[in-house]
C-alpha cells in the first residue's frame, strides 16, 4: 500500500509507491487468454482438490456459496507490464479448500476448464493470500475474466490467477504449468521482476 499524499503530484507519488518495477497503471481491465474463452454455467461448475495419493474432494457452486465469503481489495500486476490498483472482488480464501485435505505435498497445480494450468507453492495459496473469486466490482465475474470462478493470487504476476478454475492437484515435486513451460518464471514475484525464466 502506498502512502496518500496531498496536493499537486500526490496521485503520481501514490502510484509510484504502489507499482512494482517496470509496471504502468491501466484504468481498463485488459483480457489476456491463451485460447478460447470458456463458458461454464454455475450449475455445471465444480472445483476438485486431488491429493498426491489420488484422493479427491469436490465443491459445487452451491457449496461455494455456503462457504465463508470475503470482500477483497487488491492490486494486480500482469507480466505484460500493466497493473491495476485496488481491484474489488468477492471470493473464498483458498485455505478453506485445503482444511480437510490430508497431504504432505508442498506444490499445487491449478487447473482450468479449457486445459490451462499454473503451478504454485502450496504456502502461496494459504494464509488468505489467495482466493477462489466469483465477483468483480460488485457483479458476477464475466466469462472473459474467468467467470464463473477464477483463482486470485494478487501477490504474484496475474498469469498465476487461473481463469475458469476447476481444480487443484497437490504435487510432492514442483512441475511447470502452461506459461511456466513456455519460459515464464516459475514463481513470478512482481516486486522482484520475476517475469521470465532466469530473471
Ligand atoms: N484459464 C486461463 N487462465 C488465465 C489465462 C489463460 O490464458 N487461461 N491467462 C493468464 C494471464 S497471462 C493473465 S495476465 C490473466 C489475465 O486475466 P484477465 O483476462 O482477467 O485480465 O489471466 C491468467 N489466467
Ligand atoms: Mo499475463
Image: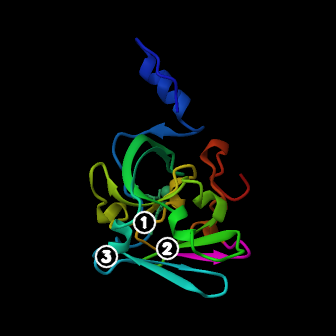
Q: Which residue range is magenta in the image? A: 168-175
Whether tag 3 and tag 1 are in contact, CB under 8 A, the answer is: no
Q: Which residue is mark 2?
A: 116
The residue at the point 39 percent across, 57 percent down is 69
Q: Is residue 28 left or right of residue 124?
A: left
Q: Quadrant of residue 191?
A: top right
Q: Is residue 140 left or right of residue 185?
A: left
Image location (x, y in percent) of residue 9:
44, 16
Q: Is residue 15 left or right of residue 62?
A: right
**Residue 169 in the image: above or below residue 29:** below
Q: Earlier in the sequence, mark 2 or mark 3?
A: 3
Q: Is disc 2 surrounded by few (<14), some (14 to 19) or many (20+) residues within 10 Å?
A: some
Q: Which residue is mark 3?
A: 40
Q: Is mark 2 within 8 Å of ligand 1?
A: yes
**Residue 90 in the image: above or below residue 14:** below
The residue at the point 65 percent across, 56 percent down is 196
Mark-to-mark CA distance, 1 and 2: 8 Å
Whether tag 1 and tag 2 are in contact, CB under 8 A, the answer is: yes
Amino acid at each position: 500500500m502506498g502512502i496518500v499524499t496531498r496536493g499537486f503530484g500526490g496521485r503520481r507519488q501514490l502510484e509510484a509507491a504502489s507499482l512494482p518495477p517496470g509496471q504502468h497503471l491501466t484504468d481498463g481491465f485488459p483480457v489476456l487468454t491463451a485460447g478460447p474463452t470458456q463458458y461454464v454455467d454455475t450449475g455445471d461448475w465444480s472445483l476438485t482438490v486431488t491429493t498426491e495419493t489420488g484422493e479427491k474432494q469436490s465443491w459445487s457452486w452451491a457449496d461455494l456459496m455456503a462457504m465463508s465469503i470475503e470482500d477483497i481489495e487488491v492490486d494486480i500486476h500482469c507480466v505484460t507490464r500493466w497493473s491495476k490498483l485496488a481491484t474489488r472482488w468477492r471470493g473464498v480464501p483458498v485455505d478453506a479448500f485445503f482444511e480437510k485435505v490430508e497431504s504432505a505435498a508442498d506444490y499445487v497445480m491449478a487447473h482450468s476448464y479449457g486445459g490451462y494450468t499454473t503451478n504454485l507453492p502450496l504456502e502461496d495459496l494459504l494464509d488468505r493470500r489467495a482466493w477462489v473469486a466469483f465477483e468483480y466490482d460488485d457483479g458476477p465475474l464475466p466469462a472473459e475474466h474467468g467467470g464463473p470462478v477464477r483463482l486470485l493470487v494478487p501477490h504474484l504476476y496475474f498469469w498465476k490467477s487461473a481463469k475458469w478454475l476447476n481444480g487443484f492437484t497437490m504435487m510432492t515435486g514442483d512441475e511447470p504449468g502452461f506459461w511456466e513451460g513456455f519460459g515464464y518464471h516459475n514463481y513470478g514475484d512482481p516486486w522482484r521482476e520475476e517475469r521470465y525464466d532466469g530473471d
